[in-house]
Image: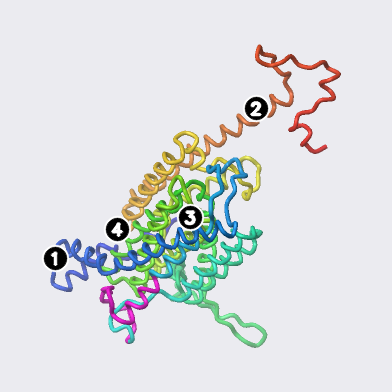
Amino acid sequence: MTLPMDDLSLPTIEELAQRVSALEGAEPAAEQAPSMLALFNGYIWVAVVAFLVSVIATPIMRQLALSQGIIDRPSDPRKVHRRPIAYLGGAAVFLGLMFGILFSYFAYRFDWLIEFHATEHGTPETLGNPLPVPLSILAGMAVITIVGLLDDVFHLPPWPKIGGQLFAAAALAYEDVGVKVAAGLLQPIANVLGFEDLIFTVPLGGMSFQIDLIYWTGTLIIAGFVIGACNASNLIDGLDGLLTGTTAIAAMGLLFIAMLLALADDGPLDGMRLVLCLALLGACLGFLPHNFNPASIFLGDSGSMLMGYTTIVIVLTLGDTGRTNLVIAGLVIYGVPLTDTVLAIVRRKLAGKSVSVADDQHLHHMLKRALGVKGAVFVLYAIGLGFAVLGVLLSVSRARVGYAASLLFASYIGIIAIKAARQAQLEREADEKATRHELPVTSPRTPAAPEPSEAVETKTTEESAEPA
């Protein structure tokens, strides 16, 4: 499918910023750097509050988890730790996020500490300030975290978690958060076909109903993005500090784009996007010291799904004014979990296994075997930083070189990972075949094989465990 970004004829962020600066009678180059710094300084207290709450709440949640027996026991050989580790880290991250966002509410109401940027996209009640974070996003965060906590404690089946993710997606669609992403995809098609809009009237039983194709397509996109991001983050949460660090790096990349959009006064969601980016960054940085190797607490499903949900919400809001190219740039920024998930699906399909079957061939598993836990985490941090830089470059220009570089970067990682996983699978199959069908080799350090009559009656543990 041909991407429509080059056909939208929309100005880039840099062009919008230059126009705004020109209208103000200032040189664009001279205003850009200090304006970005002032914007960052104006909102920085959101990150500070989220950081402080997260860093203080984490040891409290750890003690609560230990006292209630909510711990992760190293029963799976794929796990790195060799002693029980507390869960409930996701609750600490949730508290950091919530307090950072709620602080923006109080600052918004009482004009306190946060210097909100001026905008023409607010309402008469906002007095020129940007709109606050919609309550639908907070509701989605709460539901995702609660369902994840229930899974951490009671080990729920997959369907309740999917149900919680769909509820969070429906809450976003109810307040039109992310729905307009579909406009950048479908509106050019409607223009080519001669339609002014994609709202159709359908007669049914003597009545008629209007169907907004853009709205319902956007709703489906939201559902797919939320489910995909929550599960992608959950899959990559396999090493101490890996998901927390890569999410913080992605938040920094998304924050850079959010500041550029706010400077250009792109739309009504500019302010809330800045708050979400800074709250996510602060909460991750507050949790990371406790979660880095050797970890004293884990995120659990509640934390991993929450990080995926919050990140994808920010990505979806990038397309609020129909800029599908910015949504793609946001997905590139969050490329580490997404790439690993795609590789897991491809790998398991090639092996003839269900996509839900766990294995030890994820990117972090392969890097851990070669570099150790910390080495693998730092390499994936570097890869995440590379994706973030590519995503930012894609957001400030329409150069096809950027898309080509992103595709090349992800493909190079993917091909190497699939080759390594396939090689490991072939080696395991060869070892199993040799164990089952070849005669044992007698060495000076091993006793001689038993007599044939004894060998027939003696079975190894693996053989006795095989089904008849």
The mark that comes first in sequence, 1 or 3, is 3
Nearest-to-viewer mark from 1 and 3 = 1
Residue 27, which numbered label? 1
Q: SS class of the residue under badge 1?
A: loop
Q: At label 4, which amino acid type do we have?
A: Val
Quarter occupied by the C terminus:
top right
**Real-space Cα separation, disc 1 to disc 3, in angstroms:** 40 Å
Residue 430, which numbered label? 2
**Real-space Cα separation, disc 2 to disc 4, in angstroms:** 50 Å
- Callout 4: 10 Å neighbours few (<14), some, many (20+)? some
User: What residue do we see at 86% from left, 18% from top?
Assistant: 453
Q: At label 3, which amino acid type do we have?
A: Met
Q: At label 1, which amino acid type do we have?
A: Glu
x and y, in percent, of residue 211 in the image:
55, 77
**Real-space Cα separation, disc 3 to disc 4, in angstroms:** 23 Å
Q: Is residue 275 left or right of residue 202?
A: left
**Real-space Cα separation, disc 4 to disc 1, in angstroms:** 19 Å
Residue 396, which numbered label? 4
